[in-house]
Amino acid sequence: MSETFTSASDEAFGLRDHARLSFDLDADICVVGAGLAGLTVALEAARLGASVAVLEGRHIGWSASGHQLGTVMPGYSLPLQDLVERVGFEDARELWMLSKEGAEFVRANATEELMPGIAPSDGALEVSNVDDGERLIGRLQMLNEDFDTEVEGWQIDRVREQLKTDHYFHGVYYPKAFQVDGRKYVHGLAALARRAGARIFEDTPVVSIDPSGIRKRIVTPSARLRASHIVLAGNVHLGAPQRRLWETLLPVWRYAGVTAPLGDRLADAITFKGSVMDSDSVDHFRIVDGDRLMWASPETTWAARPERFAGAIRRRINAVFPRLGPVEISETWGGATGQTVHGMPQIGQLRKGLWVASGFGRQGMNTAAMAGQLIARSILFGDDRWRLFSPFELVWAGGPTGRVAGQLVGMWGRASSAAAGALARYRERARLQENLREARLAEANRAAAARPPRRRPPGQMQPPPAEYPEGEGG
């Protein structure tokens, strides 16, 4: 993988001693899953004085949490206007403020001296695949005035000054958004949680959970654990212990790659230094290591070897930035996320002492961080803001049939987005050609008007008037 993702080893974070749980244990809180959400619960709860045990079936950040582009900005997968229509303005504003708190939590951790090498950089740009300036103005007003979020509207010329392609039109720039090395962040988060007192056990899958009683019971292959609270943060990999939760998520594998060094030709095509994502969630990219391009695009509802998608990523880059010429994909990776039917994360209490933090597909790092903070504070301080997520209950995602349908819908959505973008670019070219024709016609008319009237040579007689036919004239 790239220098940006792997230059710091696990030993540098002190992670080699996360052994399998091999003895019975009691804790205040048991977290199932050592991804972004689970580790944030562990860190926040341990800082607040609770005893915490984290159980991870494989290893820290092994799936989506350790394989993402690291963009941190406010918001959810559900569009803001849809969120307002679903829960009302006041609750939508509260939910948006929570997402901003999650982003600031990540920023605070990213500046920790104990989390080295995650290379934070500022700015995120959401670009439109179609020419829709009126919708852009309405969204800017809502974000600025109603949701207290600093954003800038970029006109087409400014977007294309930064991204040398006619693929994109208007843009929304988030100056306070930022990005970090995602893999290093999740490992640094684990290191901070351990230093705060949390105990993390890898290679420890959960066999069964009994959530009844004051002290809940968790069974693993080699030990048992009791806890007053259980937090399920295992996403689509929970499986049999919590089948009801697992079946509410549509598993989606997102694939990404990093190009070989591109030298000066990358600067000729892209001068924007932050993250770029399109309005249809098809492409997400940014520059890493100075002259390499990190790009996420293909997704499926089944697992596949990431290297199979190198060609698709290369073709997508060439389609958007043809001036780059041929590019080589030097590394690829992928991870599974759980996407919900309603487009919002699942955060809250399933029953007394049994909590869920899941459904973070397409939600962003800020949302997983916010969920971890919120649940830890709910358990220890009685913070009940998790109830804001109550309208977004567990909804069955359709099982295997739903996964096939989800893939077909995704393919249709991407095709529709591509068609809409192609139509928008065709209309733009037609408009430019029409403007050029009108400019040429106007120039010709001006030139004709400026020419002096033609004079007759001296001595040339005036031609006689035409004779009228019989019966006409005066």
Image (spheres, rainbow, N blue to C red):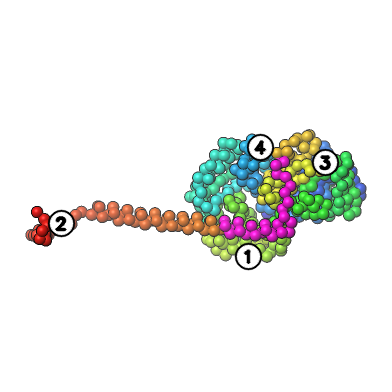
Task: For the C terminus, give its image quadrant.
Answer: bottom left
Secondary-structure class at tag 4: helix
x, y (%) of residue 204? 85, 53
Q: What residue type is disc 1 on? A: Gly
Dot 3 falls on a residue whose secondary structure is loop
Q: Which residue is mark 3?
A: 353
Circle 3 packing at 10 Å, graded few (<14), some (14-19), many (20+), is: some
In the picture, the disc for residue 91 is 4
Q: Secondary structure at mark 2?
A: loop
Q: Are marks 1 and 4 in contact (CB under 8 Å)?
A: no
- Residue mark closest to the camera, 1 vs 3: 3
What range is drawn magenta here?
389-417
Q: In the depicted view, which residue is nearer to us: 121 or 309?
A: 309
Residue at image point 71% right, 63% down: 304
Q: Which mark is residue 311?
A: 1
Q: Which mark is residue 455?
A: 2
Residue neighbourhood size for the residue with mark 4, other residues' Cα within 10 Å, grouped as few (<14), some (14–19), many (≥20): some
Any magenta on residue 412? yes
Q: What residue do we see at 64% from left, 35% from top?
A: 90
Magenta includes 124? no
